[in-house]
Amino acid sequence: MHLLEVKNLTVSFDTSVGVFNAVKGIDIHVDAREVLAIVGESGSGKSVAMLAVMGLLPPTATVSADKMTFDGKDLLAMSAADRRKIIGKDVAMIFQEPMTSLNPCFTVGFQIEEVLRFHLGMDKAKRRARAVELLDQVGIPNPAERLKSYPHQMSGGQNQRVMIAMAIACNPKLLIADEPTTALDVTIQKQILDLLVRLQAEHGMGLIMITHNIGVVAETADRVVVQYKGRKMEEAGVLELFTAPKSSYTRALLAALPDNATGDRLPTITGTNFEEAV
Amino acid sequence: MATVLEAKNLVRDYHIGGTLFGGGRTVHAVKGVSFKLEQGKTLAIVGESGSGKSTLARILTLIDRQTDGELLIDGETIDIKKTGVTAAMRRKVQIVFQNPYGSLNPRQKIGNVLMEPLLLNTDMPAAERRERALDMLVKVGLQPEHFNRYPHMFSGGQRQRIAIARAIILKPSLLVLDEPVSALDLSVQAQILNLLADLQDEFGLTYVFISHDLSVVKYIADEVMVMYLGEAVEQGTRDKLFSNPEHPYTRSLFAATPRADVESIKARLAKKAALASA
């Protein structure tokens, strides 16, 4: 049994100019202790697919799937209230912009403790102790002091660490990271990626890494799903994807990397009709 | 080849806070940077946020004045503290910013975006301005019919093409590109990098290319300067810097850059397997 299994997921949005299909029938699964990377450019539906799993899409979105199970539980049949008990506890998510995902009006300590209070019902002293422990785990120096800081008093990298601390607060079974390092410098990106992979290994979590950065995929993933315009173009082990990409889209994507430049100009991705290789 | 740009010991300090009676502090954003750049070449400036690379860009493009040091463009000393910025200076230096969504006025038609620099900095007649703008649209890979459209009708990559067209319509000797592809998808990034290379060949443009993405730098640069905390810690030709980085900061930057080659992936997977079985 997979930790998360989604079959034939479609997501569409009602807009003023008609229905827009963001995700067009995608199968995704991830196991415990596995790092799955979902790669795609903007508009490929990679974030929307995961937001649908989390149940975080706005009311204008219509989500349908043949199957959506997490840890053996059917997410589709579940009431919204039951789902809330899983989301944030057993499945947690980290977003791209740490500065905007944290509430500027509250200290980071308050925001971490809120998770512990809501999901685990810990008392005040326990919450405090756990929050210090979490900040320590994500590598923030002097954690007891830092709990009193507001997001604007910390750097982008530190705020992302706080987001990660909140996400792992309840020892989730699955962590979904949506472009966790896109807003950060390369040196900080390296630290955050190392941290995520270390925590994933230590806690035996499943980790879904949503990214458009091929380098991030190469550095973290076990298995990769390539998405383009709401469809899955390819699914492969990370080594297989880089050595023998099956889909023409994946090949075009890899060729467009400046690292792989051979001639005077970079090959560009032309056309929009790529065959799927699933 | 003629030297287009020369910086001699450029310094920029900012005074922050304080009251009528003193206090406050001074931030040394750029601490004495010197370099020379020949016509038709590309200098890449690399560094993380806070390294002073954008402050330097502001000085080079005459948006901001240096606190100390000398700036020569086309062999002429330029000191905007004394002379202000003249139309002749503006024609020499132009800039393209990172975010094409923020750098275009949403209420200005593309044609006017392109004609405005000509209107302000030259005494070209209206018909000729229009003709030049239409020419430029085609040069950067857009269509003449885009002339009367608004920025929101374009994709991110197309908007960056417009920003580039606006910058080169004055036929500047120096073009400063401040993270021009950081906000773009991989496939669009490849297109814009190719466009920049084409334009450089055609007009003999000189580029100062600011970036934190080393794979892009390696692809586009002739010379590289690494900045850290306001200082140029290392500078040299691309080949020298990439084959033999000397400064510890440059090395840490290389170490932090995600590697997408098959050997690194194999090494990472082997390490992971060894850890799992241990």
Image (cartoon, coloured by chain):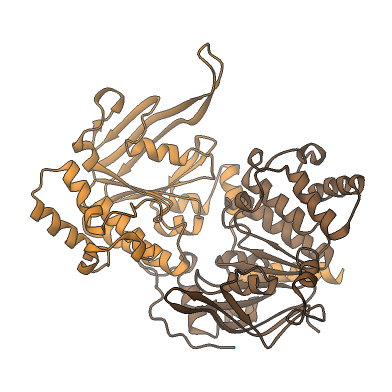
Chain colours: A brown, B orange
Task: Look at the image and tell me in which quarter the C terminus of chain B lies.
Answer: bottom right
Q: Quadrant of residue A69?
A: bottom right
Q: Is residue B7 above or below residue B91?
A: above
Number of numbered discs overlaid on the protein picture: 0
**Relative image position of residue B210 (x, y in whole percent):** 43, 48
Q: Is residue B226 above or below residue B180?
A: above
Choose between A6 and A38: the one closer to the eye: A6
Choose between A83 and A8: the one closer to the eye: A83
**Relative image position of residue B110 (x, y in whole percent):** 26, 58
Residue A33 visible to the viewer: no
**Relative image position of residue B233 (x, y in whole percent):** 52, 38
Q: Taking A135 as reference, is B63 left or right?
A: left
Q: Is residue A149 above or below residue B255?
A: above
**Relative image position of residue A139 (x, y in whole percent):** 76, 48
Choose between A145 and A137: the one closer to the eye: A145
Residue drawn at the location 80% of the way across and 72% of the way down: A82
Q: Is residue B147 above or below residue B11?
A: below
Q: Quadrant of residue A182?
A: bottom right
Residue drawn at the location 49% of the way across and 59% of the way down: B215
Q: Quadrant of residue A11?
A: bottom right
Q: Taking B139 as reference, is A233 left or right?
A: right
Residue drawn at the location 83% of the way across and 62% of the way down: A171
Q: Taking B198 as reference, is A67 left or right?
A: right
Residue A7 visible to the viewer: yes
